[in-house]
Image (spheres, rainbow, N blue to C red):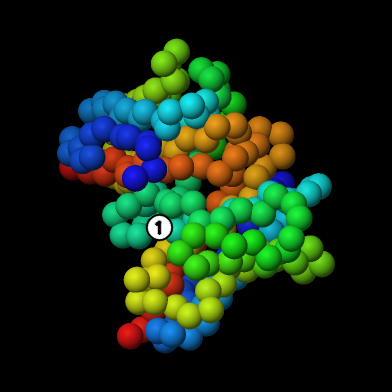
Amino acid sequence: DSGVTQTPKHLITATGQRVTLRCSPRSGDLSVYWYQQSLDQGLQFLIQYYNGEERAKGNILERFSAQQFPDLHSELNLSSLELGDSALYFCASSVDPGDEQYFGPGTRLTVT
Amino acid sequence: AQSVAQPEDQVNVAEGNPLTVKCTYSVSGNPYLFWYVQYPNRGLQFLLKYITGDNLVKGSYGFEAEFNKSQTSFHLKKPSALVSDSALYFCAVRVKGNNRLAFGKGNQVVVIP
């Protein structure tokens, strides 16, 4: 158990819908990262936050957004969902940016 | 730009034989390098990292990695592979500036009983 929690574990929704994925980092970790993993694209970095502020953006679509709250938990919002958005979404955290990251168990999103 | 390359898609090894998973990197400045392992339907687990010091880094589950500056490599090794080592292995490098990690595409390791 890494100490990073993610909810929900599984999510099935229809195209065009909007969902929110939630992540709680390890106690004491200030940095939160979001990744998307699919068979065809592999592990893709989406976005990074540090102590509530956005630090880096990766291959994140405009339909996706995220934030980190004062209590350091983070949410990833996915809207106007398409079939191709079906993937595993991981959250990770670290004490400082650039430290080793600890990954949550992931949320498996299925868009039908 | 900082990046890592994992040249092999899959590594097959017999149980009990040495296991090597290759990684080469491209960075400006001193590299911070990491290895992670992912078991099916699980998140990535941190194995080990190289920051500075001894070129041979020891990590979890009997794994170690050798940093080679002249060859810009950071290969993961295990002297004697177990069937339970079958998993997806990722190499990563810290990106200068925002300090996030850039991951390689991953290597599937299959340990044959």
Give the residue pinned by disc 1: B38
The residue at 59%/62% (across/down) is B58
Farthest top residue?
A70
The residue at 66%/33% (across/down) is B98
Q: Position of residue A57 (x, y in %)?
A: 55, 32
The residue at 40%/70% (across/down) is B85
A44 sits left or right of A1 in the view: right
B20 sits left or right of B88 in the view: right
Q: Quadrant of the C terminus of chain A?
A: top left
A23 sits left or right of A61 in the view: left
Work out whether A53 lies above or below A24.
Answer: above
Q: Secondary structure at mark 1?
A: strand
Residue B76 picture quarter: bottom right
Foreground of the two, A79 or A8: A8
Q: Position of residue B77 (x, y in %)?
A: 57, 72
Please tell me how crowded label 1 is: few (under 14), some (14-19), or many (20+) other residues with Cα within 10 Å: some
Residue A80 picture quarter: top left
Foreground of the two, A95 or A19: A95
Foreground of the two, B55 or A21: B55
Q: Position of residue B73 (x, y in %)?
A: 70, 66
Q: Amino acid at mark 1?
A: Gln
Count the numbered circles shown: 1
Work out whether A91 lies above or below B62.
Answer: above
Q: Quadrant of the N terminus of chain A?
A: top left
Is residue A86 shown to the viewer in this render?
yes
The residue at 47%/35% (across/down) is A93
Foreground of the two, B95 or B56: B56
Please state the chain letter of the residue tagged with numbered disc 1 in the rendered image: B
Is residue A83 shown to the viewer in this render?
no
Residue B21 picture quarter: bottom right
